[in-house]
Amino acid sequence: MCGIIGLVGRRGYHVNQLLYDGLTVLQHRGQDAAGIMTENNKKFHLRKSNGLVKDVFYKKHMTNLLGSSGIGHVRYPTAGSSSVAEAQPFYVNYPFGISLAHNGNLTNADEVHKLLTNVHRRHVNTTSDSELLLNLLAMELHSRTLNLDINGEIHVDVKTIFSSVHELNNQITGGYACVSLISGFGLLAFRDPNGIRPLVFGSREIDGEKEWIVASESVAIHALGFDVERDVLPGEAIFITSDGKIFTKICADETNHSPCIFEHVYFSRPDSIIDGISVYQARLNQGQRLAERILEEFPEHDIDCVIPVPDSGRYAALQLANTLDVEYREGFVKNRYIGRTFIMPGQAMRMKSVRRKLNAIPHEFNGKNVLLVDDSIVRGTTSEQIVEMAREVGANKVYFASAAPPVRYQNVYGIDMPAVKEFIANGKNIDEICQTIGADKLFYQTLEDLIEVTSIKGQQSWDTSCFNGKYVTGDVTDEYLISLELARNDDAKINNDKPGVTIELHNDE
Ligand code: 5GP
Ligand code: MG
């Protein structure tokens, strides 16, 4: 998963600080790399590198990032490797100079790659599907603007841009939300026809002049002092000219809004509103429904307290405790200075870092029957370790609840869940999973319940593929899933993540 942001500010003012601040607000969407591209008088300025936003941009970079429009990206690798060459935004010089940042994953990247290299003879330098997307967009714009030069002046109109996006949408499949700078013209943003990945835009007025922002989550818009206009619609493109005029159009033959439900389980910040749904409210609802099910299944329960797995388990746990009418207690302290465990390649590394990340407060466990609540169980690393920790500090019984159903299928739309055999639920029923994590009882939300309580605004369709293997784009074949698994499983990641340095060489040092 990634986070993206785009800004068109007033002429003469620089948007570098706003982009930086926005990326820090979107940091939870990706910690692997960060990048900003700005445009000033038809010159692009770029800084991107591996690392957190605060570690990528120094003062010297910021002072170079001049311009009143720009885009930014925080990366969490889902396709390709995590080498710095694949950090975003990407850039092509032809036509006009275009730069692009993308959140999501294309499911027909191989096909697009063949088309670009064999038919259009474009050079694609990385394994990132975002570079493919940018090149295809460039190709579409190029083929439509060949004859548009008037008196030697390069000109591209909004109609041409929208028809290029329309043709792009006809040629790519998957989940994608993008922001793109077209040099000399403005900022383009678009969302795939299923609206799988979120994208929202906003504005503000200063001294009678409009400024515009597009971002993965509404929280970035609010944090920067803008007002949300609305979500970008599935299949919609919006174009904001460098002087602040906005145009919007649905650029798809067919749209079927099916947003990723996992955004509401785990990925988004709780203070965001996506497609009109408060992520916080969705998580409270998930906790409440799960509690109702626990009461049905375990009416004479002996749970003394509910303890969340911080941080993402807190919201569901809070409402779950209220509904069960048992105490909500904080039993684990999280070290906020440590990276995420999930994306660390290799199971051994993940196990170690759960212990470093979370520590139990014995007082909350001693002699008690505790119900631990997390938003989801993926590989089971967190739950297994945390159940053990609870027992070590004297818990009597340890129950576990997951606000999401078992994750059993690969995610192909931009969440890093590529290898089925790494999921704890793979090939196991709930009792077997419970045994593996060592809990006394395990409660999972059902998919029907998750959908019902998250559809606060009557959402009709969701991407729930990691829970039921149904892929809304309809093009995902077994062959594709196998190739994804091979490219992105733990072993592959460990090799990918050391570009240019073999592990043996590293060990010899
Ligand atoms: P597990 O330890 O079972 O592999 O993963 C579950 C834990 O990781 C949960 O605490 C959940 O909050 C978190 N998690 C779930 N999905 C993702 C993801 O896509 N990326 C990251 N970084 N963490 C995740
Ligand atoms: Mg968590």
Image: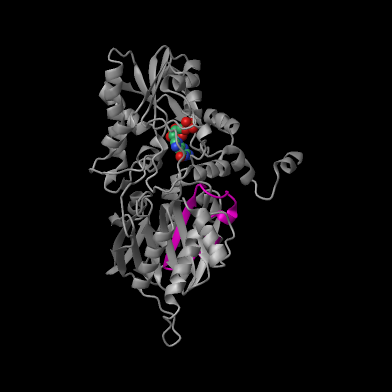
Q: Quadrant of residue 307?
A: top left
Q: Is residue 85 rendered magenta in the image? A: yes
- Is residue 285 positioned above or below 8 on the image? above
- Is residue 340 positioned above or below 22 on the image? above
Residue 14 in view here: no
Q: Residue at x 52, y 62 (%)?
A: 115
Residue 321, position as x, y percentages in the image:
30, 24
Outermost bottom residue: 151
Q: In the rendered image, which quarter contains the C terminus?
A: top right
Judged left or right of residue 508, residue 79 is left
Residue interval drawn in magenta: 61-87
- Is residue 343 positioned above or below 220 on the image? above
Nearer to us in this view, 2 or 175: 175
Residue 411, position as x, y percentages in the image:
45, 41
Nearer to us in this view, 297 or 419: 419
Residue 376 in view here: yes
Q: Residue at x 48, y 27 (%)?
A: 427
Residue 201, position as x, y percentages in the image:
32, 57
Q: How many marks?
A: 0
Outermost left residue: 458
